[in-house]
Image (tube, rainbow, N blue to C red):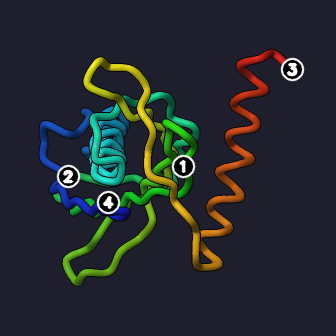
Amino acid sequence: MHRITTSVQLVLASHCNGNPQPRLFGGQLMSWIDIIGGVAAQRYAAKPITTACVDNLSFLRPAFLGDTIVQKAYVTWTGRTSLEVRVDTYVENLQGQREMSNVAYLVFVALDEDGKPAPVPPFVPETEEEKEEWAQAERRREIRLAGISGK
């Protein structure tokens, strides 16, 4: 069972907006985040998935035309049929040094052959970092559920 997925992209002109210095369009980055997050969720669940929500998306540093984008996605939490994935995005220079560009948390739901929610394998955090991510995921889930119920 895979828990971590990585991806590398090169920022091309078609990925940029028209500012004086061509910057990576935020919507393009959001698409890459959803794709890698979905791949990580699907690989972990071993089932088709659908995006339920993007819980948090923080833009910390811009990326520009010609930059290399490195992404790492990993499962941080599982429920019965849903799972949370964290996606870290880095801008990498030509010397291989990486700078954090974006952090995103997404929730996915696993689907059965009829498109209905299906159980996912439980994730049991082992390291201190995994346990902290799990605890933060639980807090994000409580906030989401409170928002849905209006309380």
Please give left or right for residue 119 compared with residue 136 in the image.
left
| Circle nearer the N terminus (3, 1) | 1
Does 119 appear above or below 36?
A: above
Residue 113, picture quadrant: top left
Does residue 107 appear in this view? yes
Three-letter code, disc 3: Lys
| Circle nearer the N terminus (3, 4) | 4
| Horizontal and vertical percent position of residue 30 | 36, 38
Three-letter code, disc 4: Gln
Please give left or right for residue 89 compared with residue 42 in the image.
right
| Circle nearer the N terminus (2, 4) | 2
Mark-to-mark CA distance, 1 and 4: 21 Å
Q: Residue at label 1? A: 78
| Circle nearer the N terminus (3, 2) | 2
Residue at x-position 27% and y-position 63%: 6
Depth order, front residue of 9/121? 121
Question: Which label sits on residue 151?
Answer: 3
Three-letter code, disc 1: Thr
Return the residue found at the far bottom: 95
Nearer the observer, disc 1 or disc 4? 1
